[in-house]
Amino acid sequence: MTAGFHFTFANLEAQYKAALDAGYEILTCIDYVERRETLPERVIVNRVDIDLSVKKADKLREIYSRLGIKASFFVRLHAPEYNPFDFENYRVLKALRDDGHEIGYHSEIIDQAAIWGEDAADCLRRDIDVLNRMLEIEIKGAASHGGMTGLNNLDFWRDRSAKEFGLVYEAYNEGQEFGLFNTSFYISDSEWTRWKCYNKGARCDGDHRTFAEHLVDRHPLIYLLIHSDTYFDRHFYE
Ligand SMILES: [Zn+2]
C-alpha cells in the first residue's frame, strides 16, 4: 500500500479479515434483528450506504465473496450521482441480491417532500414499491441518508414506525424496532478521510482509530457503517 492512503479496498479487506480472525461473526442488519435474542459472543453488523457509486459497491461485493461474509446495502433512488437502472449499476445491484446480501432503501423522503411538494409518507411508499419491483425483492429496512439539503431525513421517523410501511426497521431507530446505534459500538467512515466512532450513542471525541484498531477492545457488538464511495484501489481520484 502506498504510504498515507488508508482507504484502499485492499486495506479494507485486510480489516475484515482481522475481524474474522478475532472471532467476530459478521451479520446483515436483518440478520441482527432476527437473531438479536441469541447473538454470538462477538458480532459486527455490516452496513454499506451507497451514496455516490454503485460501481464501487461491486468491489465490496468481490471482497465479501472472497471472505464469505454478507452486508446490508442501502440504495438511493434519487441521487444526481447515479442512476440505479444504468446498465452497469443495475447489473451490480442484481449481483448483490443474487450473492445473498440484504438490499435496503437509503431514504431521502424529507428532501423529496420539500423539493417536490409531496407527502413524505407517499414518497416512502412509492420508493419501497419501486425498489421492490426493480429487484423483485421485499426490502425489510430503510436507512436515512444525510445529504446536502440541510434537512434531516431521520426526522420522518420521530413519530412513525417501520411497520406502518411494511418494513421491519429503520437503521438508526433507537427503540425496540432496531435499537442498534444506541446499544452498540458504532464505527463509521462517513468523514471520508478518517474513521469516527460512538459508544452506545455517545460520540468518542478525538477517536479516529481505524475499524481494525478497535478490534483489540473486544466490543461484543459493533455496528459498522461504510460507504462504497470512500474506497479506491490506488487513489481517491481514480
Ligand atoms: Zn448516505
Image: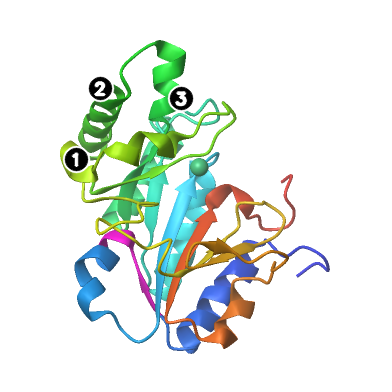
Instruction: Give how far across and how far down residue 121 sits, in percent.
Output: 27, 26
Q: To which residue does mark 3 refer? A: 111
Amino acid under disc 2: Asp
Q: Which residue position is annotated with label 1?
A: 136
Apparent side of residue 142 relative to residue 48 in the rendered image (left or right): left
Q: Disc 1 beta carbon < 8 A from ligand 1?
A: no
Residue located at (27% from left, 54% from top): 98
Check disc 3 and give the amino acid type: Asp
When the figure is inspected, residue 63 is found, relative to residue 40, above or below; the finding is above
> Marks 2 and 3, Cα distance to the nearest angstrom?
13 Å
What kind of element bears circle 1?
loop
Sequence order check: which comes first, mark 2 or mark 1?
2
Q: Which residues are magenta?
A: 25-30
Q: Residues within 10 Å of mark 3 (few under 14, many from 20)?
A: many
Q: What number is the disc on residue 126?
A: none
Say whether residue 159 is magenta: no
For marks 3 and 1, the one nearer the N-term is 3
Residue shown at 59% from the left, 78% from the top: 214
Residue designated by label 2: 122
